[in-house]
Image (spheres, rainbow, N blue to C red):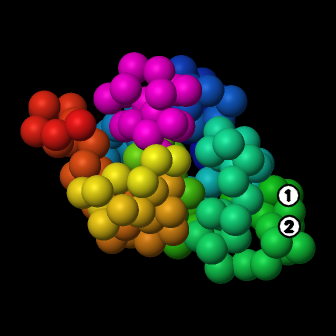
Amino acid sequence: MEALEHYSNSQQAVSGVSVSVNVLTDKIAFIHAVRVGVPGSVVKQAIQAMGNNRELFVRLLETTPGNLHRFYHRKALSRTDSEEVLDVLRVLYHAQTVFGDTAKAHEWLNTPIPALAGETPLNLFDTFEGRQLVREALRKIEFGEFS
C-alpha cells in the first residue's frame, strides 16, 4: 500500500504515467519511491509517454524485446530498475517543463543536437551519464545559453 501513495494520490508529472510531480521534483520523495519500488505498470505507461519507444526500455532495463512485457506485471521493480525508470521520467518531465508542451519536448528529444555530439537526446536516455548530458542541455536552453 505504501508504494501506491506515490503513484495515485497526486497530480501526474507526465501525462498518462502514474507518478506524482513530487516524486520527480523532490529528491527525498524520489529516493523513497526508489526504495519502495515502482509498480511494473509504470514501465508500460512510461513507454507510451516516450512515444512507444520500447527499445529504450529494453536497453534501460537490460532485457530483451520479448521479455519486456514481464516487467509490466511486477508488483514492484528492483531499486536499480525503479531508479532508472524514474530518472528517465524526471528528464522527460524537465523537457516538457522547459518547452512548455509535450509535443515540442518530444520533437526536441528526437532531433540531433550539435551540443550532444549530433546525438538525439532520446538516444542518450539509456545511461545515467547520457541523461546528465541531456539535463545539462535542457538547463542551458532554460537559461538561454543555447537553443
Q: Which is nearer the eye, 143 or 72? A: 143
Q: Position of residue 47 (x, y in %)?
A: 70, 49
* Count of residue discs: 2
Is residue 71 highlighted in magenta?
no
Q: Position of residue 43 (x, y in %)?
A: 70, 53
The residues colored magenta run 94-109
Residue ID for mark 1: 73
- In what quadrant of the picture does the N terminus appear? top right
Which residue is rendered at x = 37% and y = 26% of the image? 99
Which corner quadrant of the image does residue 5 belong to?
top right
Is residue 95 highlighted in magenta?
yes
Q: Are marks 2 and 1 in contact (CB under 8 Å)?
A: yes
Which residue is rendered at x = 53% and y = 26% of the image? 102
Which residue is rendered at x = 13% and y = 31% of the image? 144
Residue ID for mark 2: 70
Does residue 75 appear in this view? no
